[in-house]
Amino acid sequence: MSRDEKDAKAIDSKEELKMANERRIEELLNINNRYVRTQRHLEQYSDISDPENLRHASRIQEERKDRMENLKNIIAYGKHDQVDDVENLEKNLEYTQGYVENNASHMDEFSLRKTLEKQAHRKEQLEFLD
């Protein structure tokens, strides 16, 4: 491989990394915006919310914190968490899809809607992680 080819390849690698980091920053901002909106909502309405909804929101907030921390580490240090997020998301998508297909007729409307929303969020996450 000639020096010019190596230089061109290095430039391509830098451009790919730059584009990937731009997507990661955009995803980090999106997650942070959702985190902040949910946090405000919890602060305003926690006294009238259903306890189960509060627990669910807390779990989602923890997931968001973890994802933000992971994206920060990838952007700043080039390090991923030990957990394979893509594999976990794909597995959760597959299992949940099977569950919905088998149980949608037995689920209440709220649970079905929330499950489908979660599936949509998982698909979005996969797009940004790939």
Image: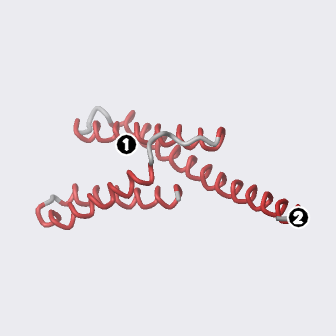
For the image, the number of numbered tags is 2
Single out the mark in the foreground, 2 or 1. Answer: 2
Q: Residue furthest front?
A: 1
The location of residue 42, given as percent across then percent down, is 37, 36
Q: From the image, which quarter does the N terminus lie in?
A: bottom right
The location of residue 50, given as percent across then percent down, is 22, 39
Q: Quadrant of residue 75?
A: top right
Q: Which residue is drawn at 23% across and 64% down?
A: 98
Q: Name the residue under label 1.
A: 60
Query: Within 10 angstroms of label 1, few (less than 14), some, or many (20 or more) residues?
Result: some
Tell me the element at label 1: helix
Q: Residue at x 27, y 63 (%)?
A: 97
Query: Within 10 angstroms of label 2, few (less than 14), some, or many (20 or more) residues?
Result: few
Q: Residue at x 56, y 44 (%)?
A: 71
The location of residue 9, given as percent across then percent down, is 78, 62
Asked whether, in this view, residue 17 is left or right of residue 70, the answer is right
Q: Name the residue under label 2.
A: 4
| Amino acid tagged 1 | Ile
Q: Which of marks 2 and 1 is nearer the N terminus?
A: 2
